Amino acid sequence: MQKAFSTHLAFVLILWGQLAYAEATDLADAFADAARRHRWGQTHEAIAIWTRLAEQGHVDAAYNLGLIYQYAGGVPYQPQEAARWYRLAAEAGDKAAQFRLGAMYLRGEGVRKDEHLAHEWFTRHRRAHLLHHHDARFTRWQEEAKRLIEARDRHEARVAALTDAEHTFARIRSSARAACARGNTRRSADESQESTRGLPSHPQ
């Protein structure tokens, strides 16, 4: 009887392993499909797939959603959504998500600014998360986060400058067209007046 039980247990474990492998393969295929769709510009389809995977605990899918919403990768800039998905990945132990969430707390992007929480997330994957605020390692991580933030600010400033320049050129073109139209109207009126000079006001 014990032998029969052992055989049954072995069969169950093998079956469970096969199912787990099939599920993992399906998740990997779905993740890759979403990545392809995002590269092809099918952002909303990719987000739908990654959202489903992230809700099932897929850390990389949650991290990708954070990136998309933080950097407006085919969707409007939504820092609150970015922080939400980063948090999901960070709480599952993803180091990159922990760092990015810490940077968002450091800046107050999508979350209430909180340097203590920033420090905690920067150091979550280390046993040193109770270090003093001015510890050299924390200072180094803080400086790295600030560099990332400054790089993003420079990028946003360049985009804003280009947008302002386009709007300025559009206003100049519009003003030039309006001035040209007024000039044409004035010339037409002058030419009409010139053509009537020398004629009696009331023809006989």
Image (cartoon, helix red, strand yellow):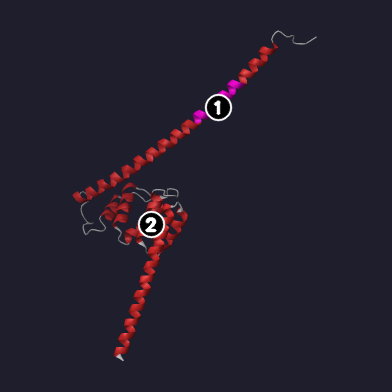
* Residue 135 in view: no
**Occupied quadrant, residue 20:** bottom left
Q: Nearer the viewer, residue 44 or 111?
A: 44
The magenta stretch spans residue 183: yes
The region drawn magenta spans 171-184
Q: Give residue 158's position: percent from left, percent from top.
A: 38, 38
Q: Nearer the viewer, residue 169 or 40?
A: 40
10 relative position to 128: left or right: right
Which residue is depicted at the point 32% across and 55% down? 97
- Point out which mark residue 85 bears: 2
Q: Give residue 1's position: percent from left, percent from top.
A: 31, 92
Q: Residues within 10 Å of mark 1 (few under 14, many from 20)?
A: few
Residue hosting label 1:
177
**Occupied quadrant, residue 16:** bottom left
68 relative position to 134: left or right: right
**Main structural element of the magenta stretch: helix, strand or loop?**
helix
145 relative position to 56: left or right: left
Q: What's the distance in space between the residues labelled 1 and 2, CA to CA? A: 49 Å
Up-down: is 54 above or below 155?
below
The magenta stretch spans residue 61: no
177 relative position to 78: left or right: right
Q: Nearer the viewer, residue 103 or 23?
A: 23
**Occupied quadrant, residue 180:** top right
Which residue is depicted at the point 64% across and 19% down? 188
Mark 1 or 2: the one toward you: 1
Figure disc tally: 2
Up-down: is 182 above or below 198?
below
Amino acid type assigned to the residue bearing label 2 in the image: Trp
Q: Dot 2 lies on which element? A: helix
